[in-house]
Image (spheres, rainbow, N blue to C red):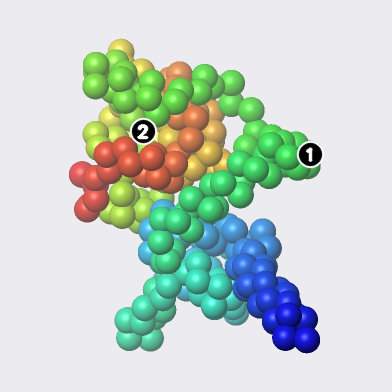
Amino acid sequence: MRDATHGAAQTDAKAALHDAFAAGGKAPARGKRLELLDLLAQCERTVDALSTAARLDLTTVSAHPQTLKRAGFVATRREGVRIHCRLAGDDVARLLTLLREVADRHQTAVPAARSAYLGEDGAVEVTHEEVRARAEAGDVVMLDVRPAEEYPAGRIPGAICIPVTRPADRIAELPEGTGVVVHCRGEYRSLAHEAVRLLADHGRRAVRLSAGMLEWRLVDLPVRTGEAA
């Protein structure tokens, strides 16, 4: 009898453990929550800033961070009347990238959705290792086209920071005769693709970093913080 009781207790404990794991899996199980995690992987943001960046109304966006916070993915702090949100740790960012990679490999709908979103820019892609070697040799300049508010939290050393909304009026800042490597937030973000197309429209060819700032940081490559020049 004691063995049966013990066995039932163990079964209940195991079920409770897996339910606890599953609760973490449920929290990001909406596309918009994954998008918010992606935005917070770049820098800390207020709820208002998240609303603007994700193009969601304030009421909707306010609920999602609370769900993610309860699951342990997001941490918050209050500054006056403003709530600032950030990822709870780099392990959350790694989980986000791994989830996308697994979905890309195993879910048939993802490649088509990715192509429809990112579009075709005809650009050659280069890896982190390739671009570091070429940058150190002075063969290329890095062009970071993320929104300016994301630069202080971390950027690639030596990169020229020009938001994708402004390349046309700042293209003269890119040195002539040097290759341009464009990057943005991450592998599944469209800003770098848009920038490559805009540069091509103005007669400048560019290659694209195969990943982005998130992946660069997660493999412990050099990152500079503080205001960009």
For residue 69, the mark is none
Closer-to-camera residue (111/204): 111
Label drawn at residue 143? 2
- The residue type indicated by label 1 comes to Thr
Residue 8 pos. (x, y %) = 75, 80
Q: Position of residue 120 (x, y in %)?
A: 64, 28
- As drawn, the label of residue 108 is 1
Secondary structure at numbered mark 2: strand
Whether residue 78 can be seen here: yes
Residue 139: give x, y in percent of width and height. Answer: 29, 15
Sequence-first tag of 1 and 2:
1
Residue 190 position, x and y percent, is 56, 41
Is 105 rendered above or below residue 94? above
**In this view, 147 is above or below 23:** above
Of 71 and 149, nearer the camera is 71
The residue at 65%/43% (across/down) is: 102
Q: Residue at x 37, y 25 (%)?
A: 129
Secondary element at image label 1 = loop
Image quadrant in which the C terminus is located: top left
